[in-house]
């Protein structure tokens, strides 16, 4: 448990922030009624001194409480940061190592990408390439970013090319 907390504390923090955001959006706590009333009074005063565009925005925001606003901000921010960390952790994972077939240790060659590969490339913001094992009996195919031989060999002699196994 201690290792899990040490390794994933940032992701857990983002999940807690998302849960606090959901809690603020879903439940209405009566403690801050004074702050909500002050916010509504200030907003109504601002609305009366501006143009028709501000009136439309004011009508929208007058129905949203301070908890909704803070909750949505926390939810969106924590979701973005959580997805960013998961993307970063995924791209740096050990599964993206090696320039040979992970199943049979044979040679690989580049093949056409699938529509799902293109969507994944858009989501992770990387240029992805699909490779397949040359051994027909193996049938492995996977995604790399970069080319298999673009990266220098490490101390173990393997090339860090970043692949994923399907």
Image (cartoon, grey):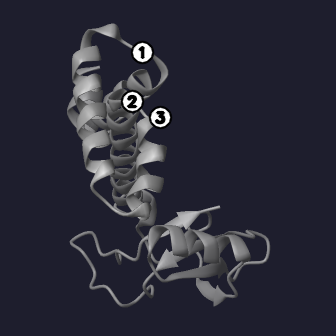
Label 3 CA crowd tier, 10 Å (few <14, some 14–19, many 20+)? few
Distance CA(mark 2)–CA(mark 1): 9 Å
Label 1 CA crowd tier, 10 Å (few <14, some 14–19, many 20+)? few
Question: Is 1 in front, or is 119?
Answer: 119
Drawn side of residue 133 relative to residue 148, left or right: right
Label 2 CA crowd tier, 10 Å (few <14, some 14–19, many 20+)? some
The residue furthest front is 48
Q: Identify the residue under disc 2.
A: 65
The structure residue drawn at horizontal position 32% and vertical position 37%, both measured from the top left corner, is: 14
Q: Earlier in the sequence, mark 2 or mark 1?
A: 1
Residue contact at pointers 2 and 1, CB within 8 angstroms: yes
Distance CA(mark 1)–CA(mark 3): 14 Å
- The answer to whether 158 is drawn above or below residue 55 in the figure is below
Q: Identify the residue under disc 1.
A: 28
Drawn side of residue 29 relative to residue 56, left or right: left
Q: Identify the residue under disc 3.
A: 63
The residue furthest top is 30
Select label 1 or label 3 by which is in front. Answer: 3
Drawn side of residue 91 relative to residue 63, left or right: left
The structure residue drawn at horizontal position 26% and vertical position 49%, both measured from the top left corner, is: 46
Distance CA(mark 3)–CA(mark 2): 7 Å
Residue 36 at x, y = what percent?
29, 25
């Amino acid at each position: 448990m201690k290792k899990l907390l040490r390794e994933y504390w940032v992701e857990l923090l983002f999940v807690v922030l998302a849960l606090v955001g959901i809690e603020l959006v879903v439940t209405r706590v009566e403690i801050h009624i004074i702050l909500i009333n002050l916010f509504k009074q200030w907003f109504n005063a601002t609305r009366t001194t501006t143009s028709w565009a501000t009136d439309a925005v004011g009508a929208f925001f007058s129905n949203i409480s301070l908890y909704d606003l803070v909750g949505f901000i926390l939810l969106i921010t924590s979701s973005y940061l959580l997805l960013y960390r998961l993307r970063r952790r995924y791209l740096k994972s050990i599964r993206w190592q090696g320039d040979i077939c992970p199943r049979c240790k044979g040679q690989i060659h580049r093949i056409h990408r699938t529509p799902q590969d293109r969507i994944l490339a858009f989501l992770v913001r990387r240029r992805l390439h699909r490779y397949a094992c040359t051994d027909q009996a193996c049938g492995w195919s996977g995604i790399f970013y970069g080319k298999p031989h673009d990266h220098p060999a490490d101390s173990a002699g393997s090339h860090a090319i970043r692949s994923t196994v399907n």
